[in-house]
Amino acid sequence: MEADTEATETRSIERVAMIGAGTMGRQIAALVARSGRPVRLFDTAPEMLTAAPQRIREETLTQPGLDRYAHHRFRLEPPADVDAMIARIALADSLADAVVDADLVIEAAPEVLELKRDLFADLSLLAPAAILATNSSSMPSSLIASAVGDPGRLLNMHFFAPVWFRAMVELMSCGQTRPEVMASAEAFGASLGIVVAVVRGESKGFIINRVWRAVKREALRVVDEGHADPEDVDRLWMLFFGTPSGPFGIMDMVGLDVVADIETSYQQVATDPADKPSATLREMVRRGALGEKSGEGFYHHPNPEYSNPRWLAGEADEPNERGA
């Protein structure tokens, strides 16, 4: 935590705009609405936007992956009145409509730098008084700062999905973020009932993803170099750490296309030869095997092989045929 945060005046954040209605965007919108705040949600894909309320209802009521996250010691309880939560989420007809009068705008668009820079250039003009935050999981907001007229109100605000089980957010300055903006974002995160971590300075990948990236990179290298199959990497990981899934299972949950985009963003600034693109990952994406979202990735979904205790013991009836 930053030492002077408590002594810094904070801005009240009551009206929030969420840009992006994909998995992460709609879950952040639900998390904010759970706190009693009104949210305006926008996405350039109309079908994604119109589907968001029902997807939020399903994800909140059914808590998909509950068994998978049962070991989590801290998680949020869904609201008693899910319909009331969803009613606080208004679907905006345009970007301008979404951000009108917003105190905070959170972006959850694809991990493409130029797309984000163009979007924040628009947000800078459309929401001249709002705090602007990117939920990017890999890009420091300093890369976006020059597109914003007042970078003092820009920062990283990185949430995690599923928000009910991974109840945390990482905050990171763009290098020019004003202290009161950081303090306001921290107070806002705490008001959602989640754990807030403030990154000191600038860290590519922030905290969790920087550590996770090292695990992910080495897991892919072990497979690329022919030392093991993804199944054995995960099996040993799960047995050693006592987790419900391993690195490749987690990549399936995230989405292999998203993993590939994030890896590309790291590789663009990398100097280590070990950061070269993974042939295994590239082939999976080429085939459209994207993990849970496509029904097939390193495992078959919705009932991945690693959920079978016999598989974990190396006794599964059928091997997982990835074709990669």
Image: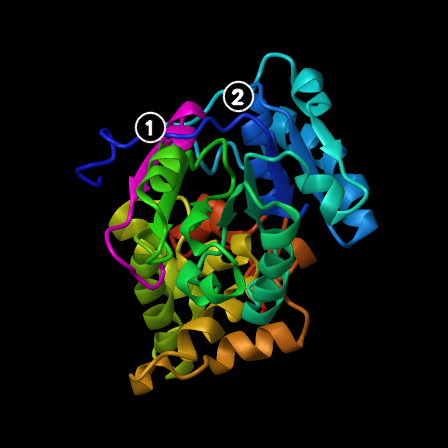
| Quadrant where the image shows the N terminus | top left
At label 1, counting other C-alpha atoms closer than 10 Å, the crowd grade (few under 14, some 14-19, many 20 or more) is few
Which label sits on residue 112? none
Left or right: residue 224 versus residue 295 is left
Q: Give the range drawn in magenta.
A: 187-205
Colour setup of the view: rainbow
- Residue located 74% across and 31% down the image: 90
Kind of residue indicated by mark 1: Arg
The residue labelled by disc 1 is 73
Instruction: Give the x, y percent position of residue 322.
Output: 58, 70
| Distance (Cα) linking label 1 and label 2 | 21 Å
Res 120 quadrant in image: bottom right
The residue nearer to you, when weighing 109 against 267, is 109
What is the total number of numbered labels drawn onto the structure image? 2
Q: In this view, does 72 lie above or below 20?
A: above
Q: Residue pushed farthest top?
A: 80
